Image (spheres, grey):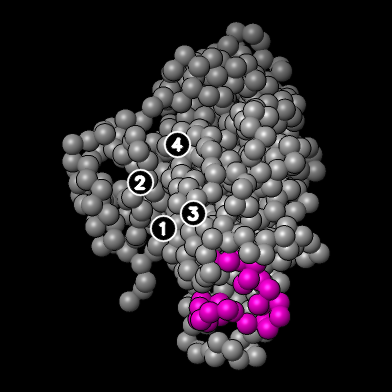
């Protein structure tokens, strides 16, 4: 039976290799175990690039044991600790300092705000008795990421010693000694390093640790004594967690093979984006603002519904193999979902589906989750390709379809070929073969209706022709290059999707790039198992890949009815193109020859079709998009939604 998916902040889901490492027994004084300990210590210091000036001291027990040991060892008995608090774990540091009889003062920023560097500087200026400052890098009770660079600079400028609780940060969030100034970082192996519980550790500035002899309040939590004994003998002072150390060594192998801290962070960020997008699509509200949300654990508002009960919700999710975490806030009912562990974005999609199923079983519907309106800026635009970014008039797909049908003795007009535009190409061929007129000609030529096998054969003919010719139809539409530059200057991400299959997109993308059309992401119609237009999946795949926090901050622009339907189904603002694409179907040269009255007629007919499909706006071509973005942002600011 598969182990449950632990979407918790530690213990968490571990790899089979990490689990297997614990099958071997070790002698605690054996030279091989001493070598293992020394190697793990060295590798942990290397994660912060601290080899010359720092040392690692491991300690039996949970992460809290290690935090208490660091405070008790580094903070002099006549010293004073300033504890920066925005959650339960900051409060725990203050509590354990008080229990050991050391002086402690606190700056409490509540549960939804990061540490304010200005308030920190003021507190240090007001109280010269403060010798040390303690802060939680990522506050596990909510997922807040505190501004460590600013905190480090202020503490260092004041001549104080900084202690960082990096329990939910070490291995994922950056903390090299070249970036941050500190005397101690405290962590454990069972979080972002993806080991198992039972051991904490401290990365300590050696010069500071050397001054700490006899300072600790506890025999077993004396890190100076632990360090001296390890340096002299290579052994632990008391019975070591041998199996935990062996598992951590293997977990570090995997950490380094993955690419170290940057790669681990990238995977967790992908997990977090996938999770947040999925939860918001269910109508659930994330507790923290995106700019302070660490990609470690996400706190979610409980649905405002009389049926809500966390114990029931937990049991339903666990029955499906997903273990979640209760909330840890004092003023709001929440639950938490971890993004860390030996998991990927596919696991997060499973979690979202399990959460949705649990809510359905509890008869809690999205509208009861009280989704608040989005009032920010446009974050992304998802473009179609032919008729939108390139290929004025959208001739590449249609002309190739006409030629493919001609190879089977069937004449298809340009107008007929354009009717199903926007669909995946196999679906386009099928729809075209069933179209009145084309269907009759097929029956007359072949003596039977077009079958799916015939569609397969036509598609096999169509695809090589499309691959061969797509580059010839990939010139940028006038204004496209400038518009993309304007969007990027406004920090708007550029997504895209197409009715083309991946083999065609792989030919189109580099050629378009050589012409000046660059996008941040491109989805082909056969990339997703769910399919293409008119469903929302390709548009939503862009949302996930681009890391957009709210689909209402997205705009879908397309020249076809299925493309507009796709954008509306995804919950986005939609913009139709009346003259540059399929609905008018003229080249730029042909369009330039039209009389004003003819141009107006084409624009009116195309606009009516796109508006009927649900477009919020219709413009002539991509060149008019910046003004539409301005209009949408004004509507969002007023609280209007797509």
For the point 53% across and 19% down, which residue is it?
A: 632
Q: Which is nearer the eye, 329 or 440?
A: 329
Whichever of callouts 4 and 3 sits on the residue coming sooner in the sequence is: 3
Q: Which residue is mark 2?
A: 327
Quote the CA–CA distance across marks 1 and 3: 34 Å
Whichever of callouts 2 and 3 sits on the residue coming sooner in the sequence is: 3
Q: Position of residue 544 (x, y in %)?
A: 52, 45
Instruction: Residue 157: tell me if it is visible.
Output: yes
- Numbered badge on residue 172: none
Q: Which residue is mark 3?
A: 100
**Quadrant showing the N terminus:** bottom left
Instruction: Residue 278: tell me if it is visible.
Output: no
Circle 2: element type: loop
Circle 1: element type: loop
Quote the CA–CA distance across marks 2 and 4: 12 Å
Magenta range: 221-246
Circle 3: element type: loop
Q: Which residue is mark 1?
A: 7
Please indicate whether residue 34 sits to the left or right of residue 192 in the image.
right
Residues under numbered marks 2 and 4 in contact, where contact means CB atoms less than 8 Å apart: no
Question: Vertical placement of 484 versus 626: above or below?
Answer: below
Q: Which is nearer the eye, 255 or 282?
A: 255
Which of labels 4 and 3 is toward the front? 3
Q: Position of residue 635 (x, y in %)?
A: 49, 16
């Amino acid at each position: 039976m598969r182990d449950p998916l632990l979407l918790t902040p530690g213990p968490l889901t571990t790899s089979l290799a990490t689990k297997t490492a614990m099958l071997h027994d070790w002698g605690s004084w054996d030279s091989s175990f001493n070598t293992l300990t020394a190697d793990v210590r060295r590798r942990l210091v290397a994660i912060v690039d601290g080899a010359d000036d720092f040392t690692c001291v491991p300690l039996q027990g949970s992460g809290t044991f290690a935090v208490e040991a660091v405070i008790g060892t580094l903070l002099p008995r006549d010293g004073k600790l300033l504890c920066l608090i925005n959650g339960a774990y900051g409060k725990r540091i203050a509590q354990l300092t008080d229990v050991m009889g050391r002086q402690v003062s606190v700056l409490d920023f509540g549960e939804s705000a990061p540490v304010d560097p200005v308030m920190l500087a003021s507190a240090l200026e007001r109280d010269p008795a403060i010798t040390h400052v303690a802060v939680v890098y990522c506050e596990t009770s909510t997922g807040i990421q505190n501004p460590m660079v600013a905190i480090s600079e202020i503490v260092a400028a004041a001549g104080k010693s900084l202690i960082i609780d990096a329990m939910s940060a070490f291995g994922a969030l950056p903390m090299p000694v070249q970036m941050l100034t500190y005397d101690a970082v405290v962590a454990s192996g069972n979080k972002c390093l993806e080991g198992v519980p039972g051991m904490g550790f401290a990365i300590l500035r050696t010069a500071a640790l050397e001054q700490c002899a006899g300072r600790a309040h506890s025999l077993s939590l004396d890190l100076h004594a632990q360090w001296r004994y390890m340096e002299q003998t290579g052994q632990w002072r008391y019975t070591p967690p041998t199996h935990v150390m062996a598992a951590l060594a293997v977990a570090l192998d995997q950490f380094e093979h993955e690419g170290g801290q940057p790669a681990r962070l990238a995977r967790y960020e992908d997990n977090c984006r996938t999770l947040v997008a999925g939860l918001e699509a269910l109508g659930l509200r994330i507790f923290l603002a995106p700019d302070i949300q660490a990609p470690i654990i996400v706190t979610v508002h409980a649905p405002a519904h009389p049926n809500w009960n966390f114990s029931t919700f937990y049991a339903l999710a666990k029955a499906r193999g997903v273990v979640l975490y209760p909330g840890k806030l004092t003023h709001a009912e929440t639950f938490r979902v971890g993004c860390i562990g030996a998991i990927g974005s596919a696991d997060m999609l499973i979690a979202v589906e399990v959460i949705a199923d649990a809510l359905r079983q509890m008869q809690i519907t999205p509208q009861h989750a009280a989704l608040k309106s989005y009032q920010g800026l446009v974050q992304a635009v998802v473009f179609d390709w032919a008729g939108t970014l390139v290929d004025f008039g959208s001739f590449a797909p249609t002309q190739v379809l006409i030629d493919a049908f001609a190879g089977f003795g069937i004449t298809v007009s340009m107008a007929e070929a354009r009717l199903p535009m926007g669909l995946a190409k196999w679906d386009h061929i099928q729809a075209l073969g069933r179209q009145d007129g084309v269907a009759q000609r097929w029956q007359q030529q072949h003596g039977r209706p077009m079958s799916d096998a015939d569609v397969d054969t036509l598609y096999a003919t169509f695809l090589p022709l499309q691959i061969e010719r797509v580059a010839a139809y990939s010139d940028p539409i006038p204004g496209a290059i400038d518009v993309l530059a304007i969007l990027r200057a406004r920090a708007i991400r550029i997504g895209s999707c197409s009715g083309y299959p991946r083999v065609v997109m792989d030919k189109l993308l580099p050629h378009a790039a050589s012409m000046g059309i660059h996008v941040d992401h491109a989805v082909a119609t056969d990339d997703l198992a769910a399919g293409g237009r008119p469903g929302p999946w390709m548009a939503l795949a862009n949302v996930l890949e681009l890391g957009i926090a709210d689909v209402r901050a997205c705009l879908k622009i397309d020249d076809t009815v299925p493309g507009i339907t796709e954008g509306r189904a995804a919950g986005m603002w939609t913009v139709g193109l009346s003259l540059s694409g399929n609905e008018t179907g003229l080249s730029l040269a042909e369009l330039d020859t039209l009389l004003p009255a003819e141009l107006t007629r084409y624009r009116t007919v195309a606009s009516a079709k796109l508006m009927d499909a649900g477009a919020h706006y219709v413009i002539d071509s991509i060149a008019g998009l910046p003004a539409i973005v301005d209009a949408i942002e004004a509507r969002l600011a007023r609280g209007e939604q797509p």
